[in-house]
Image: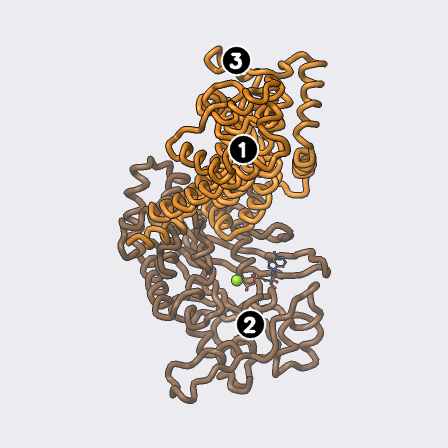
Amino acid sequence: MSDNDPVLRIEDLLVRFNTRRGPLLAVSGVSLALEANEVVGLVGESGSGKTLTGLSVLGLEPPGATVGGHVWFRGEDLRAASHRRLGEVRGASIAMIFQEPMTALNPSLTVGTQVSEVVRRHQGLSRQAARARVLDLFDLVRLPGGARHLRSYPHQLSGGMRQRVMIAMAIACGPAVLIADEPTTALDPTIQAQIIGLLRDLRATLGMAVLLITHNLAVVRGLADRVLVMYAGHLLEEAPTDDLYAAPGHPYTAGLLGAVPRPDSDRDTRRLTPIPGQVPLLRGEPEHCVFSPRCPYAESRCLTAQPPLRPVGPARSHLAACVLDRIPDPAGAAL
Amino acid sequence: MSWVIARRAVIALVTLLLATVVVFAAVHALPGGPTTALSADSTDPAALAATMHVYGFDKPLPVQYGRWLGQVLSGQLGTSPITDIPVSTQLEQRLPITLELAVLSLLFAIAIGVPAGVAAAVRPGRVIDWVASAVALGGLSLPHFWFGILAILIFAVHLHVLPSGGFVPLANGLGGNLEHMAMPAIVLGTGLAAVIMRQTRAAMIEALGADYVRTARAKGMREWQVIWVHALRNSLMIVVTVVGLQLGGLIAGIVTVEEVFNIPGIGQLTLESVYQRDYPTLQGAVLLTAAGYIIVNLLTDVCYTLINPRLRVTATRGTT
Ligand SMILES: Nc1ncnc2c1ncn2[C@@H]1O[C@H](COP(=O)(O)OP(=O)(O)O)[C@@H](O)[C@H]1O
Ligand SMILES: [Mg+2]
């Protein structure tokens, strides 16, 4: 394995449900790679399949999901790994944090216990050593009050403190990959900024790759090196963060960017311009571009098949799944 | 927290006081009276009247109640006009027997109900779930006397593995004691085991779908830790509540089971004193049973507060 091999590579991920109202294709052919130390943003509206993508990496998809494809981690396909092996990888090599730190923490165990059981499980530390390690971790995530909270229960902490505890749990064993699913969505704006800052610092000091899942493009902009845009189970665009913001290659991305309040604009003219319509539920592979029903530029050739990702713009690293070579109004004002 | 418990204790005491009224009224509402039973031994009306006077049965009911309440408050419960043994002595002799029976059947119910509920919840809709649920339904619908007699027929009469009834004190050896207690405890505890199983199953199914269980798995916790630590901890609250609520049913079942298996506990004492219209003994036994209910409820509340960290905190805030 050479240095620039990706540390995690998802290949052709497919997640399907058999619901009472027929099959549901939640993730369709998603492929992505994380280089060591890289922060990749996975963005898209709610319901586009981001969480399922993250969960599938660790084999945590909900019961009833049928998952296809591969998840390559250090040369091993985790989708083919045994339960036992997954148990060794989860929380040690690949860790995950979730959106809602209140429900994601166990209400009847102290946060000290919940953090220490990770290091006890994976590093075989004694009770004493684990306790010391937990205190270090509390420092590392800048949990206000630190040692005082060893015996606190989650409901005794604020939302931001709970998320710090979640992060402490996730980084406890120095994972190579951190999957952060909407880590700031449930928090107040000021706390959001603190958590983003914390994640940025931790990435720098600990050196881990981060898959940052969010529907908030502003969060991605502050943290990610590269951005993947997901819609109705499909990847529609992939680009280095700056390139994506400078010139989105897909009308959907342009629409999402239009929905971000621009900080430079005047307060009174700052407006959210959401894309009309909503994410469709796919029963099977669509015979048209998945975004075409909501796309202002849809034309007849968009209605034959889902276009594959292809290079757009000057950089080879900028890919978009659109037949257009450039979007008529990149600012997205027309949407 | 101690403030909450203190408040509960005061409520319990008031309830107990009300219970004395109810017990007294209920006992005296029984058809017949002490004369019915006493007159069997003595045909002389004058002697009978003298006895009635000694025990105060010739006084108006409110006076009798006041006298009894005074005795209760001073820790005395009177003396049986039938056997001439102080009521408190009888209760002291029989209470440990009933307590042993109750504790054994509670332990049996928990030992069976919790693991069965967990096993059913881990594989909902699978064979183990069906078996556990069917057995639980059976356990719930069996009347104690019927189940008791069936058990005697099978294990004592046909298989000769257990005695059909009677009691051996603990002091005479643990083996003999347990041999006699096993069947009654199982018969008494089966219904509770079924309730515990069902509630544990429901609570565990919910817990196993919770976000924190997903977090535990994402941390790489072993499956037994996920089930028995992370999920079960949150289900225990429900189990404790149910056990508390159902212990009343257990107490009610004690009378039947003690009678079927001929165990000389409080239940049998209650029945005997009903037959003999032994008012002081009956009042004592029923009052003790009522106190049992009230104490069980109090303990349930306390357990609930101890297990639920949320209540614990609100309660602490309440004191300061
Ligand atoms: N357990 C499930 N059963 C059926 N459908 C599900 C289940 N979980 C998720 N889905 C569907 O999969 C789609 C993608 O979900 P998700 O990955 O949570 O989206 P996102 O994280 O992007 O908001 C949603 O449309 C949702 O309805
Ligand atoms: Mg999500």
Residue drawn at x 48%, y 10% as measured from the top left: B172
Query: For the C terminus of chain B, which image quadrant?
Result: bottom left
Instruction: Please tell me whether residue B320 is drawn above or below residue B177 in the rendered image.
Output: below
- Nearest to viewer (mark 2 / mark 1): 1
Element marked by disc 3: helix
The local crowd at label 2, few if under 14, some if 14 to 19, many if 20 or more residues have their Cα within 10 Å, is many
To the question of a shared chain for discs 2 and 1, the answer is: no
Q: Position of residue A324 (x, y in %)?
A: 59, 79
> Looking at this view, is A279 or B259 the one in front?
B259
The residue labelled by disc 2 is A320
Element marked by disc 1: helix
Chain colored orange? B
Task: Work out how far the residue at label 2 is from the one at label 1, CA to CA, in angstroms.
Answer: 60 Å
| Among the two numbered marks 1 and 3 on one chain, the one whose residue lies closer to the N terminus | 1
Q: Is residue A84 visible?
A: no
To the question of a shared chain for discs 2 and 3, the answer is: no
The residue labelled by disc 3 is B175
The amino acid at mark 1 is Ile
Q: Chain A is shown in which shade?
A: brown
Chain identity of mark 2: A
- Nearest to viewer (mark 1 / mark 3): 3
Q: Position of residue B241 (x, y in %)?
A: 51, 43
> Looking at this view, is A59 or A39 the one in front?
A59
> Looking at this view, is B259 or B157 the one in front?
B259
The amino acid at mark 3 is Gly
Query: Would you identify the image quadrant in which residue A194 lies?
Result: bottom left
Instruction: Please tell me whether residue B88 is drawn above or below residue B167 in the rendered image.
Output: below
The residue labelled by disc 1 is B110
Display coloring: by chain
Chain identity of mark 1: B
Chain identity of mark 3: B
